Amino acid sequence: MLQVCVATDAVMGLIMGTFSMQGKQDNYRKDRVCDDLELSVVCHRPEALDLLEAQSNFNRKELQVLYRGFKNECPSGVVNEETFKQIYSQFFPHGDASTYAHYLFNAFDSSQSGSIKFEDFVTALSILLRGTTTEKLQWTFNLYDINKDGYINKEEMTDIVKAIYDMMGRFTYPAMKTDTTRQHVDAFFQKMDKNRDGVVTLDEFILSCQEDENIMRSLQLFENVI
């Protein structure tokens, strides 16, 4: 399913941007203590790094690498939606990624605070890169449940598909036709709306995805990125 595979693949452009500092590993050891102190400031609590290590699937060294990349892209320690869109659009120069980035921002901003802090970023990455299959699918479902009512309806999926095609721009294959969006939405509901009630529940979504080998493979592509 195009929609589910894109959820994991598209987010990787932003994720990989956080690793732009990895080539400077010699500086990592030198700045380790400094980064520990800065992390406590960004997260507003002295025990931030220990807490993130305990709550995520990353160890301390990996969190240091992630933080240096995050700090490089977001020196203030927080990202608002406009900045998020600017960063994300760099990875899709031939299309308009603003709408999909809006949905993605809301998924990262789980507290709906209007900004993404480092701990929000780590929480999402921990799920997308090293979470269980169920956790990854729950995160993806939340991304597509735009109004957060616990269901994916056809209007929401239509908006998602249009955003994906806008993001891919002229490199979309097959080329966008008038009825392409409707065909994708119809195929999504044919596969996932098990009881044919016009909406897809979390349980239906997870079950349908687990039955699809392509989706399962896409969820495993980036497990060893860090």
Image (cartoon, grey):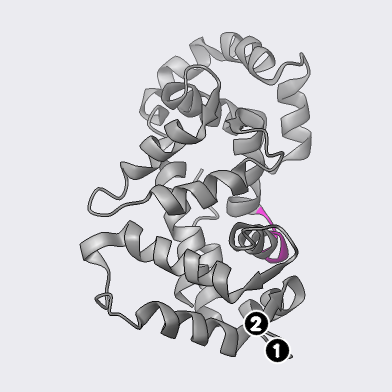
Could you tell me which secondary element the residue under label 2 belongs to?
helix
Indicate left or right for 85 with 90 as reference. Answer: right
Could you tell me which secondary element the residue under label 1 belongs to?
loop
Pair 2/1: label in front: 1
Indicate left or right for 97 with 33 as reference. Answer: left
- 82 to 200, vertically: above or below: above
Of the image marks 2 and 1, the number of the one nearer the N terminus: 1
Q: Magenta: predominant secondary structure element?
A: helix
Give the numbered dot on residue 91. Answer: none
Q: Is residue 121 visible?
A: yes
Indicate left or right for 219 with 46 as reference. Answer: left
Which residue lies at the image location 42% right of the left edge and 18% below the top edge?
26
Q: Amino acid at mark 1?
A: Lys
Horizontal and vertical percent position of residue 68: 49, 23
Q: Which residue position holds label 1?
A: 194
Q: Which residue position holds label 2?
A: 208
Indicate left or right for 61 with 184 as reference. Answer: right
Give the camera-side residue of 24 and 209: 209
Horizontal and vertical percent position of residue 84: 45, 36
Between the C-alphas of marks 2 and 1, the distance is: 9 Å
Residues drawn in magenta: 131-135
Q: Is residue 133 magenta?
A: yes
Which residue lies at the image location 78% right of the left edge and 35% below the top edge?
54
Q: How many neighbours does mark 1 have within 10 angstroms: few (below 14), some (14-19), or many (20 or more)?
A: some
Disc 2, disc 1: CB below 8 Å? yes
Q: Quadrant of residue 148?
A: bottom right
Q: Amino acid at mark 2?
A: Ser
